[in-house]
Image (tube, grey):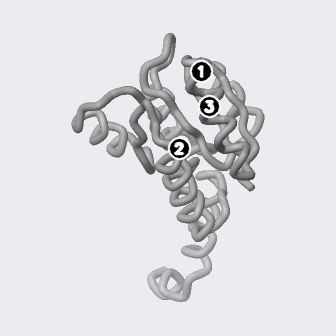
Amino acid sequence: MARILIVDDDEIVADMASKLLFDAGHVCGWVADGERALEILRWRRPDLLLLDHDMPGLTGAQVLRSLRSSAETYDLPVIMFTGLTGAEDEQHAYYNGAQAFIRKPFNAKMLLHEVNLVLKARAERPQHRSLSEHLEQAAGRWRDSPEKRIML
């Protein structure tokens, strides 16, 4: 079971995706805009974000760039979930840090498949640490390394 946040301004699509993911055993929440998504992410971190590209206010691309530049959410798995159909849009999503790209209208089996792939890949990686924790640990390893002591 994963906690999934859906960020989409289309209530019908968000409701369909939420029901599908809930039936597959996941816990889902839904918000309609990027600003609200970022507020929620400051409060609680989901296991996965399904993120629409075109929304009022902050676009999905802006939200994704904000996530990737944050020490707390730099490694949050994101699936772009959008009606955009161009190959260039998909390339930009991957460039900005998305793990997958699903076009709407979505195929239920494909959505579940991509969600499971992203969650499995995330489960096989070490648990999340804030970027500052990661840097502190790396600095500690460097300080304590025998090679450093020899160089001093």
Q: Is mark 2 on a helix, strand or loop?
A: helix
Q: What element carries label 3?
A: helix
* Residue contact at pointers 1 and 2, CB within 8 angstroms: no
Residue tagged 2: 108
Query: Dot 3: few (<14), some (14–19), or many (≥20) neighbours within 10 Å?
Result: few
Task: Give whichever of 61, 19 is nearer the camera.
Answer: 19
Q: Which amino acid does label 1 sit on?
A: Ile
Q: Which of marks 2 and 3 is nearer the N terminus?
A: 3
Residue tagged 1: 12
Quadrant housing residue 18: top right
Location of residue 62 in the rendering, given as x and y in whole percent from the top left corner = 45, 26
Location of residue 111 in the rendering, given as x and y in whole percent from the top left corner = 51, 46
The residue located at (49%, 53%) in the rendering is 114
Q: What residue type is labelled 2?
A: Ala
> Can you say whether 25 is above or below 96 in the image?
below
* Residue contact at pointers 3 and 1, CB within 8 angstroms: yes
The residue located at (66%, 23%) in the rendering is 31
